[in-house]
Image (cartoon, grey):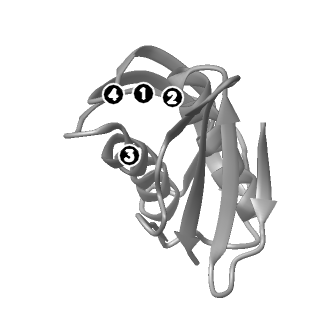
């Protein structure tokens, strides 16, 4: 439900989901796929609560939290359980482990051309990552 797309200077993914939950999970999976990394052992579970003024800012905050875990904690999250989601708030349970086999580091999630659009099948967006 995600695909890497051509972008002039950075990396970008187009993400689709039948609902906002699936869109957020697929965005995280797409970002992970760009890095080439996977979680090792031992696994770690944590909860995350976020609030934002709109769905686009919430999506960027969600992905930035995952970037923070990778860059600062050295962890990759690969299991995402969305416990609650509105266009302005998110509660999730994340499970992952030490980052293994990371090819590319994502430095930041950008707002460049970011817009969550409703489609006939759910939602779609394009996310550009600074690498």
**Mark closer to the observer (3, 1):** 3
Element at label 4? loop
Disc nearer the start of the sequence (1/2)? 1
Disc number for residue 87: 4
In-front residue for pair 64/6: 6
User: According to the image, label 1 marks what residue?
Assistant: 46
Q: Quadrant of the N terminus?
A: top right
Determine whether label 1 and label 2 are within 8 Å by CB: yes
Disc nearer the start of the sequence (3/1)? 1
Packing grade of label 3 (10 A; few <14, some 14-19, many >=20) is: some
Disc nearer the start of the sequence (3/4)? 3
Disc nearer the start of the sequence (2/4)? 4
Task: Examine the rendering and report whether any part of residue 43 can be seen.
Answer: no
In-front residue for pair 94/2: 2
**Mark closer to the observer (1, 4):** 4
Determine whether label 3 and label 1 are within 8 Å by CB: no
Disc number for residue 94: 2
User: According to the image, label 3 marks what residue?
Assistant: 56
Element at label 1? strand
Picture residue at 46% right of the left edge, 69% below the top: 112
Disc nearer the start of the sequence (1/4)? 1
Q: How far apart are marks 3 and 4 (CA)?
A: 8 Å
Where 84 falls versus 20 (above or below)? Answer: above
Q: How far apart are marks 1 and 2 (CA)?
A: 5 Å
| Residue 113 in the figure: left or right of residue 25 | left
**Mark closer to the observer (2, 4):** 4
């Amino acid at each position: 439900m995600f695909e890497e797309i051509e972008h002039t200077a950075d990396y970008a993914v187009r993400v689709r989901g039948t609902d906002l939950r699936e869109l957020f999970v697929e965005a995280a999976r797409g970002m992970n796929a760009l890095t080439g990394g996977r979680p090792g052992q031992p696994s770690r579970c944590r909860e995350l609560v976020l609030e934002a003024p709109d769905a686009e800012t919430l999506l960027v905050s969600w992905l930035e939290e995952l970037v923070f875990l990778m860059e600062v904690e050295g962890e990759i999250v690969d299991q995402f359980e969305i416990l609650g989601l509105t266009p302005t708030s998110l509660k999730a349970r994340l499970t992952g482990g030490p980052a293994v086999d990371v090819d590319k580091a994502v430095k930041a999630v950008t707002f460049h051309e970011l817009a969550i659009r409703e489609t006939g099948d759910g939602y779609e967006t394009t996310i550009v990552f600074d690498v």
